[in-house]
């Protein structure tokens, strides 16, 4: 029997945000320290993949700035 498996990896990283950011999810996505490397490994193995920013939270106030 052949099955299809969907796996999830969740990780956190910190980003310093400047005063004026017009697209917060895009900004923090571009600052992700490992996603590009993860994508290279997945692609090399011929796997389909998708990534999402799940949430962005102000560490000082715990205010949710973005949530999927």
Image (cartoon, helix red, strand yellow):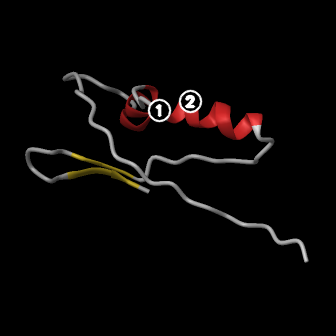
Residue 8: assigned label: none
54 left or right, relative to 39: left
Q: Position of residue 60 (x, y in %)?
A: 8, 44
Badge 2 local density, few (<14 within 10 Å), some, or many (20+)? few
Tag count: 2
Vertical order, 45 against 7 (above or below): above
Q: Position of residue 57 (x, y in %)?
A: 24, 48
50 left or right, relative to 30: right
For the residue pair 26 and 8, the one nearer the viewer reads as 8
As helix, strand or loop, the secondary structure at mark 1 comes to loop
Judging by the rendered image, the residue that carries numbered circle 1 is: 34
Q: CA distance from mark 1 to mark 2?
A: 5 Å
Vertical order, 2 against 53 (above or below): below
Which residue appears at 9% of the width and 49% of the height?
A: 61
Judging by the rendered image, the residue that carries numbered circle 2 is: 37
Which residue appears at 24% of the width and 27% of the height?
A: 17
């Amino acid at each position: 029997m052949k099955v299809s498996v969907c796996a999830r990896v969740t990780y956190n990283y910190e980003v310093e945000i400047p005063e004026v950011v017009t697209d917060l999810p895009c900004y923090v996505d571009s600052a992700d320290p490992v996603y590009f490397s993860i994508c290279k490994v997945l692609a090399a193995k011929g796997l389909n993949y998708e990534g999402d920013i799940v949430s962005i939270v102000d560490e000082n106030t715990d205010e949710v700035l973005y949530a999927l």
